[in-house]
Amino acid sequence: MTSPIHVNSEIGRLKTVMLHRPGHEIENITPDSMDRLLFDDIPYLPIAQAEHDFFAQTLRENGTEVLYAEDLLAEALTAKKVRQEFIARQVKEAGFIVGATHDALIEHLESLEPKDLVAKIYEGVRREEIEYQELDLAAVSAESTWTFLLDPLPNAYFTRDPQAAIGNGMSVNKMTYPARQRESMITEYILNYNTRFASKVPIWRGRDHVSHIEGGDELVLSDHVVAIGISQRTSAQAIVEIAEQLFKGSNFDTVIAIAIPHNHAMMHLDTVFTMINYDQFTIHPAILTDDGQVDSWVLHPGKNGKITLKHYTQLVEVLKRALGKSEIDLIPTGNGDPIAAAREQWNDGSNTLAIAPGEVVTYDRNYVSNDLLRKHGIIVHEVRSSELSRGRGGPRCMSCPLVREDLE
Ligand SMILES: NC(=O)NCCC[C@H](N)C(=O)O
């Protein structure tokens, strides 16, 4: 069976991508909840949607088929039995296992048609929306002042993170923070029940794990090399687990684990480092020491299913060897100026989405980094970014490539 997933690089011409158009979940962020929901501000929804539509249109105009996760999920949930199972699991992962609130939530969600159900899963369910048949102590004594029983999923427009296409398979991710964990269940149902994907996609690692990993840390550098960030969101243990599966079941024979600072501004590898051409990368200078060093470990398959491991500190040398290049051009965010670099990295100036070798989509606000990319010969398509950037993710974070053309 041919897989509908085909991603053997970060830069091959982008043929199919999965997005999520931000919806009312964005309006369900409040000052009290934004920290927990991983936002630094509350985007203005109509503008965020217009910016997102512009992003999608930019991709279409450059030959990319745009699929929306919400449509794929609604289609996957056509059968009542699948819908019921999905609802039960969403409610359970939101913390309701038995009792009056559990029953009332299930009843409410089961009354919705697939499209409305999907919108509700993203936007969350408020306490006052559900009707109790009978009350129990947990329901009447609920101390919580928090309005939502089922939290909104405002980070869902960052479709990069809940999963990652690698080769012809997927990493379906156990995400780090509760605010995002239910997102990868959406991926699981799309892959299991949407006819475009069902039974056709190998899963390198599913979400039923203790250790966590997110797609922003997973970069497919070539048809046999993956780079993965050891970050706030991805643990070394998860990297070893996925490396074992890739080495066993695919052509990938090299995993480069790169250690980055564990903080909100640099939460994933792709917020500080992206591949944009055969031998060109963006990089936030703050992840390197003054002499260009960063801790990285190269993993290869060893004997008897074991993994071999070697430590390096010169990233350029590691990349040259893994990609068979004599030179690597690392293009610094904000042209290396400490103020411009910090400002533009905060607004995802390093987070470029390659749509072909040497051709990227970036946020318009990062003009210092964009000018520098052009000086290095890169074609840059700028997209609007005043509201989308408030969620701390850029064009790479907002896109999950499903098919890329192979490189020559
Ligand atoms: N790959 C990425 O860096 N994605 C950005 C995710 C931003 C979101 N607010 C989060 O904290 O998960």
Image (cartoon, grey):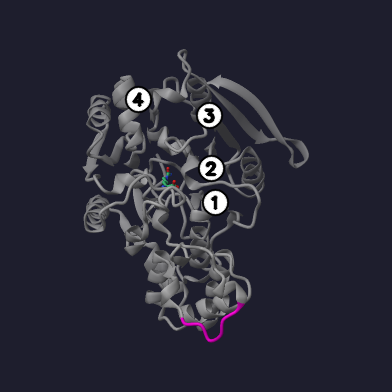
Label 2 Cα crowd, 10 Å radius (few <14 / some 14-19 / many 20+): many
Report the quarter where the N terminus lies. Answer: bottom right
Q: Which mark is residue 322?
A: 3
In the picture provided, is 174 more to the left or to the right than 377? right
Task: Where is residue 339? Give x, y as percent.
Answer: 30, 23
Of mark 2 and mark 4, the one earlier in the sequence is 2
- Is residue 108 in view? yes
Of helix, strand and loop, which one carries label 4? strand
Residues marked 3 and 1 touching at CB (< 8 Å): no
Name the residue furthest right: 304
Of mark 4 and mark 1, the one earlier in the sequence is 1
Residue for badge 2? 233
Q: How far apart are the two marked residues, 2 and 3, measured between alpha carbons?
A: 24 Å
Question: What amino acid is labelled 1 in the image?
Answer: Met
Residues marked 2 and 1 touching at CB (< 8 Å): yes
What range of the chain is rendered magenta? Answer: 131-136
Tell whether circle 1 marks a residue whose Cβ is less than 8 angstroms from ligand 1.
yes
Going 38% across and 40% down the picture, which residue do you hit?
A: 11
In the picture provided, is 37 more to the left or to the right than 354? right
Of mark 2 and mark 1, the one earlier in the sequence is 1
Residue for badge 1? 175
Q: How far apart are the two marked residues, 4 and 1, measured between alpha carbons?
A: 30 Å
Q: Is residue 27 above or below residue 286?
A: below
